[in-house]
Image (cartoon, rainbow, N blue to C red):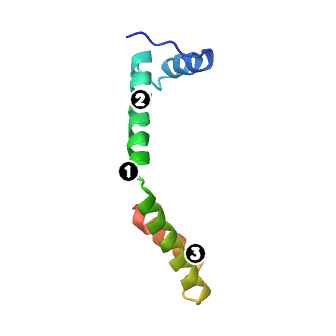
Amino acid sequence: MNINLSPALDSFVTRGVQDGLFVSPNAAIEEGLQLLERQTKLKQSFSAASEVELLSKLDGGIASLDAGQGISASQAFAMLRNQSC
């Protein structure tokens, strides 16, 4: 298979190989296509129903904040830091 890239993308791949980001031009293209495949699958899995569910959860969160049931930003960030460990 032969692939023709725009000059900008060709330059990006060439620099990536020279800088050691990719082991070869083929590896760069393969990695890019793998990312595109993942992104496509995510887009396909996001349905209108999940959008409605997300908006409903956001509305619920806003309502709880309006009712004074929120936590401080420092507490929220501390909780997020603890989850990432």
Q: Secondary structure at mark 1?
A: helix
Q: Position of residue 48 (x, y in %)?
A: 45, 58
Would residue 27 be found to the left or right of residue 15 on screen? left
Q: Position of residue 62 (x, y in %)?
A: 58, 78
Would residue 23 be found to the left or right of residue 67 on screen? left
Q: Is residue 10 above or below residue 62?
A: above
Q: Nearer the viewer, mark 3 or mark 2?
A: 2
**Which of the numbered marks, if any, corresponds to residue 74?**
3
Classed neighbour count for the residue bearing mark 1: other residues with Cα under 10 Å, few (<14), some (14–19), many (≥20)? few
Q: Nearer the viewer, mark 2 or mark 1?
A: 1
Q: Earlier in the sequence, mark 2 or mark 1?
A: 2
- From the image, tell me which residue sits under label 2: 33
**Which of the numbered marks, if any, corresponds to residue 45?**
1
Classed neighbour count for the residue bearing mark 2: other residues with Cα under 10 Å, few (<14), some (14–19), many (≥20)? few
Q: Quadrant of the C terminus?
A: bottom left
Regarding residue 48, the answer to whether it shows in the image is: yes
Q: Earlier in the sequence, mark 1 or mark 3?
A: 1
**Which of the numbered marks, if any, corresponds to residue 14?**
none
In the foreground, 74 or 61: 61
Q: Is residue 1 above or below residue 45?
A: above
Alpha carbon distance from label 3 to label 2: 39 Å
**Circle 3: residue type:** Ser
Query: To which quarter of the image does residue 30 belong?
Result: top left
Do the residues under discs 2 and 1 have CB atoms within 8 angstroms?
no
Alpha carbon distance from label 2 to label 1: 18 Å
